[in-house]
Image: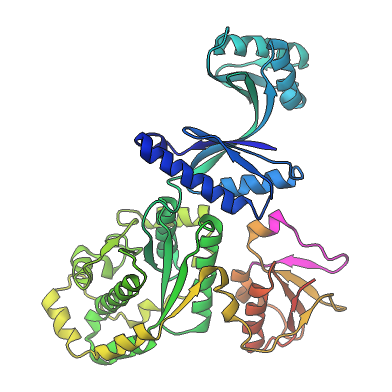
Amino acid sequence: MRFVVKLSPEIIIKSAPVRRRLIRQLRRNLRTLIAPVVPGTTITGDWDRLELSGAGPAPAAADRIADLLARTPGISSFARVALYPLGDFDDMAEHAWRCYGASLAGRRFVVRVKRTGRHAFTSPQVEREVGGRLLARAEGASVSLDNPEITVRLEIVADQLYVVESRQPGIGGFPLGEQPPVLALMSGGFDSTVASYMLLRRGLRTHFCFFNLGGRAHALGVKEVAHFLWEKYSASHSVKFISVPFEGVVAEILTRVDDSQMGVVLKRMMLRAATAVARAWGVDALVTGESIAQVSSQTLPNLAVIDAVTDMLVLRPLIAMDKQDIIGIARAIGTEPFAASMPEYCGVISVKPTTHARRERVERAEAAFDFAILERAIAARTEEDIESVMDGAVGQIAVETFQAPQPGVTILDVRHPDQCADRPLRAGSVPVEAVPFYRLQQFFAQVSPEKPYLLYCDKGVMSRLHAELLVERGFTRVAVYRP
């Protein structure tokens, strides 16, 4: 099992000292991520590429490493390769045949060679010689330089030959850990999740700050998507999930502030609270998901008035993006299902919102606000490690747990579809349905409360959490499956 990792182009163009530092950070991140998954994997190389090798059970170990590489910031692309001594043209062709021979019959193909070092031959010469030998062995095959169905990829480095078995893109960006951290204001919708991802991809360790406007289901949903983002794209570094109870702040705004100013005032209160949280953690920048003119509170005048309450840098990576582009990114990174099922509470307090806020008018509206309520909300915030953010959400309602399925029960696999595809759940003759946790509400709206179900997830936390919510709604025959 061996991989060649190509660095993000933005790393390669850096000065030599910065480039070395970024590569060292990427190596550290990969070791942290891979060690628990495939122990014994070695990571070597520097400057323009890294190599990973290990003796884990193939292909399972290789698939797990490929999955990690595909979502680790700082990687442009990576290839699964087989390594051989260079040898002569016959040797090269034999090694290429071992990898590609079974797929060449009756197909158009081309050989592409990249070469590093001094050799007695050129890259085009290797392409011709190896291609000719493969053509002679592959029945019905033909060579097509312009429109091949299969590209046989070889890399020659000094006296070694790499046969590229497969190649995948990475997400680019920079390795996590080389930039100062930021604090993302997280509502769980499309915008805040994509904004957080874009900062993670640029190598910024991103803490999450959630303003709880009321509703346990919303809080749980935001924790789920924040944990998903961290686990998938930034698990090499621990971050915090901070929850600020904002129900009292919203109630005060509804009571004291003119309807048209409510949305802007709420955003200013959030920015004030986020600034206090960020300073407490030594963070110098905030991240929000605004896109210019997407909604009424996101006009230029409104954003200027909102930002006036903080001297902290506010990063808005989505500022010039269309909503459909944002949704497209959410779909690609796996957060679309979370966002689509996330309740939106901010809109309930906006009645005929202003699109051209004036600072003096907003400040007059805030003069009636009791800022002691905001201070109490900040002081009452909870701060949790993202690794265990779901643990404290369970245990509020009694739910049974079974190690073996009971007669007549159906098991619902509530994991994310990616996890179900990677590690399918099998329970013998017991029926198993894949119903991701974000679709449970729709699923149970169509079934009888009398039918027994067992919810399953890898760690038993997500399944128990949603079982509690369902039992609370009257589905008392829902339990947890922990084989």
Q: Nearer the viewer, residue 1 or 146?
A: 1
Q: Is residue 33 on the magenta stretch?
A: no
Q: Nearer the viewer, residue 49 or 97?
A: 49
What quarter of the picture does the C terminus occupy? bottom right
| Quarter of the rendering containing residue 91 | top right
Residue at coordinates 63% horizontally, 42% vertically from top-left? Answer: 42
Q: Give the range drawn in magenta.
A: 420-436
* Residue 244 image offset from top left, x and y in percent: 40, 80
User: For this view, does 384 lie left or right of residue 248?
Assistant: right
Residue at coordinates 52% horizontally, 50% vertically from top-left? Answer: 29
* Residue 362 image offset from top left, x and y in percent: 17, 79
Q: Is residue 426 on the magenta stretch?
A: yes
Residue at coordinates 65% horizontally, 74% vertically from top-left? Answer: 461
What quarter of the picture does the N terminus occupy? top right
Instruction: Give the main secondary structure, helix, strand or loop, of the magenta stretch.
Output: loop
User: For this view, does 186 lie left or right of residue 338?
Assistant: left
Where 365 falls versus 405 (above or below)?
Answer: below
Query: What colouring style does the render use?
Result: rainbow
* Residue 448 image offset from top left, x and y in percent: 72, 83
Residue at coordinates 67% horizontally, 53% vertically from top-left? Answer: 37
User: For this view, does 411 lie left or right of residue 286?
Assistant: right
| Quarter of the rendering containing residue 371 | bottom left
User: For this view, does 261 lie left or right of residue 141?
Assistant: left
**Residue sitting at the far top:** 120
